Image (cartoon, rainbow, N blue to C red):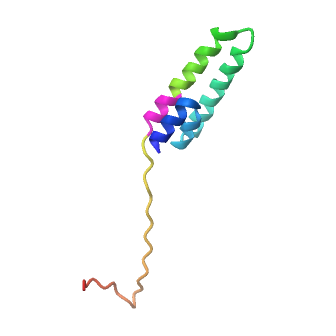
Amino acid sequence: MKTLAILINIFLPGVGTFFVSKVGEAIGQILIYWIGVFFCFTGIGLLIGLPMMLAAWIWGLVSAIGANPQPIQVTVNNTTTPDQPFDRTVS
């Protein structure tokens, strides 16, 4: 899952961060990236837009690389009842 998040963040900054359950950071990365894209097409141009896009891209990669894998939760249902004790014999 972490590898997939890194690969997605290479091409779409912020989207891969959703995969490692960092929703707040992902929204911030996506907003900063697209605001930077907007600035690239306006009069402000590359002076502000490109550094914003680059910062969001690096932030996305760092947050995906530094993400801790989510623990897997396993639920075991006990099907024995007090009337039927668990049989531990091996045949």
In the rendering, at what x and y percent does residue 34 appear? 67, 25
How many numbered tags mark residues here? 0
In the rendered image, the quadrant that contains the C terminus is: bottom left
Residue drawn where x is 74% and y is 8% of the image: 43
Residue 57 on the magenta span? no
Q: Quadrant of residue 86?
A: bottom left
Check the image and name the residue furthest to the bottom: 83
Image position of 67 with respect to 37: above or below: below
Q: Quadrant of residue 16?
A: top right
Residue drawn where x is 43% and y is 34% of the image: 66
Residue drawn where x is 74% and y is 13% of the image: 42
Image position of 12 with respect to 42: above or below: below
Judged left or right of residue 36, residue 5 is: left
In the rendering, at what x and y percent does residue 24 appear? 59, 36
Check the image and name the residue furthest to the right: 42
Q: Nearer the viewer, residue 73 or 81?
A: 73
Secondary structure mostly taken by the magenta-highlighted segment of the chain: helix
Image position of 71 with respect to 12: above or below: below
The magenta span reads 60-67
Judged left or right of residue 88, residue 4 is: right
Judged left or right of residue 36, residue 89 is: left
Judged left or right of residue 62, residue 30 is: right
Residue 63 on the magenta span? yes
In the rendering, at what x and y percent does residue 75 appear? 45, 66
In the rendering, at what x and y percent does residue 57 appear? 55, 25
